Image (cartoon, grey):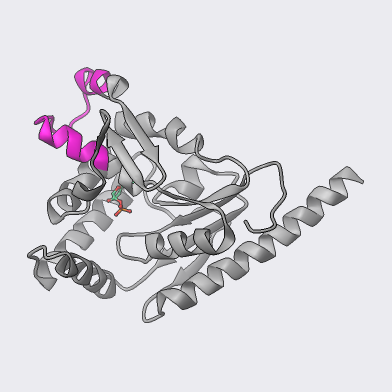
């Protein structure tokens, strides 16, 4: 964060369902504060793209574990590379939207991504968005946020995003994808979407992203000040 001098990474997690505004807000908050932005959905999407292209079904197996352990997956700033190939522009499509949760529910997929995500937490820190950031990946995060919004509004946001990109999708289809992803993400047995313990819950229904970002940045600064004072008190 601008002016942040802690040696330890300052970790902010933003979890929530599809279309709750996580990525827009996390990206803006990271930019405003000079921290790194980590979009973990991108990693799940890249794996779903790779496995589906190889015709590997979303079913747990020893074969899948082997494939994942050999798979080269890298994050370079905003770019995600699978086997050295940049797939960033191929992972935000309705086709990937409709299958990604099935792959994300597999224990071996989640296991494969755990260390990769944790390794990104270097000083000065990061703003990480996903479904299990505050509950599983960074349970000791400095600040945990949970964003939510009414499902019709979340579907409308996805519909507008996809239409702007020229993808053919109806509002009904967008709503059904959002609802089925909510269902799969919240009901899976491993790392389900939950409100992490200690998280600040913000409902973004009808609230412009700039306002949500302002509130998140305010919480980040307040938390950073408090933590820095605690660190100083420990040294004294
Ligand atoms: O945030 P997103 O829509 O790009 O995420 C794509 C999918 O990846 C989402 O349906 C659930 C999964 N996901 C997850 O299970 N855990 C995360 N930390 C991030 C995403």
Secondary structure mostly seen in the magenta stretch: helix
Please state if 235 lies on the left or on the right of 49 as rendered. Answer: right
Q: Up-down: is 150 above or below 18?
A: below
Q: Magenta part of the protein: which range?
A: 46-67
Nearer to the camera, 87 or 26? 87
Find residue 145 and report its horizontal and vertical position in percent.
51, 60
Query: Residue 122: x and y, percent?
Result: 58, 40
**Whether residue 58 is visible:** no
Where is residue 44, by image quadrant? top left
Number of marks: 0
Question: Would residue 219 be found to the left or right of residue 206 on screen?
Answer: right
Question: Is residue 53 one of those drawn in magenta?
Answer: yes
Residue under the image location 80 percent in, 52 percent down: 230
Horizontally, is 99 left or right of 81 in the view?
left
Q: Quadrant of the N terminus?
A: bottom right
Q: Nearer the viewer, residue 14 or 122?
A: 122
- The residue at 26%/18% (across/down) is 66
Residue depicted at 18% across the width and 31% down the height? 59
Q: Is residue 58 above or below residue 40?
A: above
Q: Is residue 26 left or right of residue 171?
A: right
Give residue 229's position: percent from left, percent from top.
81, 56
């Amino acid at each position: 964060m601008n002016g942040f001098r802690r040696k330890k990474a300052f970790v902010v997690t933003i979890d929530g369902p599809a279309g709750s505004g996580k990525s827009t807000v996390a990206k803006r908050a990271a930019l405003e504060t000079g921290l790194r932005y980590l979009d973990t959905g991108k990693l799940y999407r890249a794996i779903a793209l790779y496995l589906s292209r190889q015709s590997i079904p979303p079913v747990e197996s020893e074969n899948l574990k082997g494939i994942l352990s050999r798979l080269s997956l890298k994050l370079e700033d905003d770019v995600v590379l699978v086997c050295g190939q940049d797939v960033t522009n191929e992972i935000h499509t309705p086709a990937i939207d409709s299958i990604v949760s099935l792959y994300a529910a597999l224990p071996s997929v989640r296991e494969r991504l755990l260390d990769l995500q944790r390794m990104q937490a270097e000083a000065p820190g990061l703003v990480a968005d996903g479904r299990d950031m505050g509950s599983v990946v960074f349970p000791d995060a400095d600040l945990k946020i949970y964003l939510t919004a009414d499902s019709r509004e979340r579907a409308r946001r996805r519909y507008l995003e996809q239409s702007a990109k020229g993808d053919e999708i109806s509002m009904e289809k967008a709503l059904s994808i959002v609802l089925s992803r909510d269902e799969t993400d919240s009901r899976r047995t491993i790392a389900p979407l939950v409100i992490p313990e200690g998280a600040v819950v913000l409902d973004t229904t009808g609230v412009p992203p700039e306002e949500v970002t302002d509130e998140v940045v305010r919480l980040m600064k307040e938390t950073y000040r408090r933590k820095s004072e605690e660190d100083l008190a420990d040294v004294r």
